[in-house]
Image (cartoon, grey):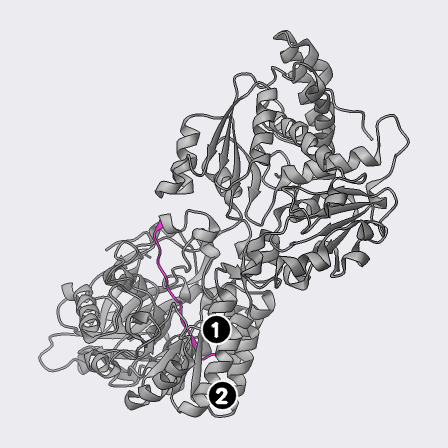
Amino acid sequence: MATTTGTATSRNTQGAPGSVLIRGGRLIDPSAGRDGFFDVLVENGRVAAVGEPGTLDPAQLAMPGIAGAAPVIDAAGLVVAPGFVDMHVHLREPGFEYKETIETGARAAVAGGVTSVACMANTDPVNDNAAVTLYILEKARKAGYANVFPIGAVSVGLAGERMAEFGEMVEAGIVAVSDDGMPVVDSALMRRALEYARMFKLPVIVHEEDPGLCCGAVMHEGRVSVRLGLKGMPSAGEAVMVARDIELLRISGGRLHIAHISCAEAVDMVRRAKSEGLDITAEAAPHHFMLDETAVEAYNTNAKMKPPLRSAADVEAVRKGLADGTIDAIATDHAPHHRDEKACEFDKAAFGIVGLETMLPLSLELVRRGYIDLSRMVDAMSTQPARVLGIGRGTLEVGAPADIVIFDPEREWTLRADGMATKSRNTPFDGWNLVGKAIRTLVGGIVVWEDEQ
Amino acid sequence: MALGSRHLLGLENVSATDIAVLLDTAESLVEVSRREVKKLPTLRGKTVVNLFVENSTRTRTSFEIAAKRLSADAVNISTSASSMTKGETLEDTARNLAAMAPDCIVVRHPASGAARFLAGVVDCSIINAGDGSHEHPTQALLDLLTIRQRMNPPGGGGGRDWKDLVVTIVGDILHSRVARSNLYGLRTLGAKIRLCGPPTLLPEEFRSFGAELYYDVGEAVKGADVIMMLRIQHERQMGNFFPSLNEYSRYYCLTADVVAKASPDVIILHPGPLNRGIEIASEVADGPYSVIMSQVANGVALRMAVLYQLIVPGADGIRGSEVSRTAVTAADTRAQAEGGDEVRTALRPAAPR
């Protein structure tokens, strides 16, 4: 399918993966400690060899039975990296196909250089049982773009009462549990979920929002909310829940992952918990390190999300948290909504924005501003999220699945919401001049995205 | 309303010059309401829609009378009558109204930002008649007009400057659009502003808007020239902003004892409707310092002024005194040609102060 910026092609239309030699690029693979000029040979959907430039001869290395030389992708002037892993997306299917489908979401992923996504359970029906998990996996297979890893619900129907059947869902293919979209309010349920998930080594991913402090609120509580007369969510609404869950983690011994961390207080708490050796990880969304509460001025409903865009000091804290590793991963919280759900009064507008196709250029902004280097950026976008989810990706070691992004960190382009691959248009970055773009995306050794140029 | 805007969405970015033009225009229209025939032909053939998606008797009536005194056709749509209750979106309601080609939509809505949203959807002028907790610019303008009349009474004798004025606003500041619009207007004119209420209803952030914060009403009104009381909503008890109306009243009711601490010629304002005995004692509301009925009377003249400035061709928004005064003169000429002799006198702005 062609968009205004490139072409996505399903793996299902391309036959079995052949051999590909990616030549002349700068390989950044933090999992192997590599950052330099290396060629990568892909065979049968996996990384077959990584070598000094010019040392891999596709003709000689071609597998027996494969005629001729492997196709060559010239990556000169580009970065070659393990495909990005977005561990926090909402694909909306089943139930909300008017916002996004697994197919359109997985296509938007590869357009952004993302080769694997983990999708949240707040669909209709909720992904709280194996039947829904298998449905998602089947739809993803039929789509043939990015790999899709379902996340199961913590509680049945996301109701926060009864624990869902983690075991059944693990056997069907979930990689984590989360009630994302909703906090787990009941502390006892949260404790038991952390403990029980240890059986399957599953991370419990938490959306931290105190319901009392945040009830009816639509943006960050601060100077802008006071000015606009909008009900605010204080940072404390996030921080008190992070504090609670760290204490629960202390007694449960499970694995806790804080989703879309957004305030300085929460970042500090995660930093302290890590220094104490607790098994805690965290992710941050590009909008939380690129925008602050002032983006809401003029009642811009595309700046409405949970957690809300916070103060400039919080943005700085998130950037520093990513720089020092307190925040392990960058994840988009890709949340498609129909135009009608945003073209309304601010109070009524849906929470969330799409993010898959802007993740790379916004993350590169942190590199340009000197917070992180390119290697750490790839680490946060590929290696770390794959490690948290335990999915065996985010690496280009020999033998790993050939999920590869080839991107141009200098490429300038203008985002047009109407030209995006996602089904929805709810982005605050429409019309922004961005720098950095995925030129080619390979999933399992097959090119599924090619930039127009 | 930014400069040159066709809309009046709030006072935050309205200049002192623009405020003066609106107040001057309103002042010249006050006299119309005292006549036997209270009608000018100025907006003949114009249509004003009052879209009230939230209950209001006073503001809606005030706008309706203002439109009618300028000979506009005024149509009222209130929540129960409109299709908003049938699940139609605000955008669709606005588009449908716009398709009927009104010249102005006056909107009251419970969501902050709703007026601004409408201004982005339709082509006609939008007047914000109160949007959630955000702004209520015509209320603040009529408050400013009422204050200015007392500062500078006709026939001289006053002549005080805004910068010498201490204004105390008491009540639920957090949720008050009246407080915000007054805060912006008074700040622009240079008055000293004190805000008073329990800490739950008075966020610290208001300091950065140029106001002093008080939790004790006696301290807050000490030496004040103007006291503006806000209506307290009994629903706020449910959010635990205060324990009970009884306790709220114990600390924040404006009684004669409290008024005694203010300036000897203090004036007392209230946007209404009054909660007698809760935020304001009856003896104060009905007493010699109260200007509450003047506010209501001024409301009509002020809204006539706003409708005039926004709708009349050639007035083209509120760009500043020079442009607007020229526009007023041009409109005068047209109205006169149409036989409205009295308009000329009525619409001449007061002399610059």
Give the alpha-carbon distance from disc 2 to disc 1, as whole Å. Answer: 15 Å
**Residue B331, percent across and down?**
64, 17
Q: Is residue A383 visible?
A: no
**Residue A326, percent across and down?**
50, 82
The quadrant in which the C terminus of chain A is found is bottom left
Q: What span is colored magenta in the figure? A: A326-339
| Secondary structure mostly seen in the magenta stretch | loop
Depth check: B333 or A128 in front? A128
Q: Say above or below: A92 vs A376.
A: above
The kind of residue on which mark 2 rests is Lys
Residue A335 forms part of the magenta stretch: yes
Residue B97 forms part of the magenta stretch: no
For image coordinates 70% across by 27% down, the residue present is B26
The kind of residue on which mark 1 rests is Ile
Q: Which residue is mark 1?
A: A261
Host chain of mark 2: A
